[in-house]
Image: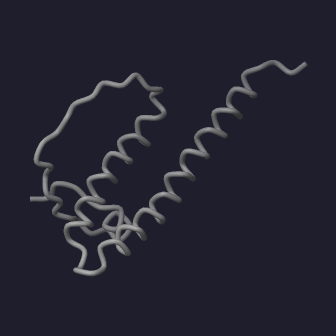
Amino acid sequence: MVIGSTWQDRLTGRESHLEPPMSRTTIMLEIDPTDEPLLRDYAAFLGEMRHLAKTAPHGAVLASCEQAVVERGREHQRRVLQQAVQARVDDAEKKPRR
């Protein structure tokens, strides 16, 4: 049964068999709708990191997790920056020029 996919699997087109979490907590947040994809992606990444830590070869857990955090962190930062700058551009375009 396919439960999810990791960031590596999305890059390679493979499917992954992630284990479901043992327990879950539901939270309610009021956010801008444009932030939802970023938050969902980050929440999925947390699960992927737990899975990676469980399945990495003995002696390579830290290196494997660190590499994933660096690579995924860059992508996440790029998306956050892009979204923030685009919001500024959109706001500037709405204001009348003086």
As drawn, 55 above or below 42: below
**Which corner quadrant of the image does residue 37 belong to?**
top left
The residue lying toward the viewer, choosing from 52 and 63, is 63
**Which corner quadrant of the image does residue 48 belong to?**
bottom left
Can you say which quadrant of the picture contains the C terminus?
top right
Tell me where residue 68 appears, x and y as whole percent: 40, 66
The residue lying toward the viewer, choosing from 30 and 17, is 30
The residue at the point 61 percent across, 46 percent down is 81
Side of 60 relative to 72 (left or right):
left
Looking at the picture, the colour scheme in use is: one colour
Tell me where residue 83 appears, x and y as whole percent: 58, 40
**Which corner quadrant of the image does residue 85 belong to?**
top right
As drawn, 50 above or below 93: below
Tell me where residue 9 appears, x and y as whole percent: 31, 67
Tell me where residue 93 appears, x and y as whole percent: 74, 27
The residue at the point 75 percent across, 28 percent down is 92
Q: How many marks?
A: 0
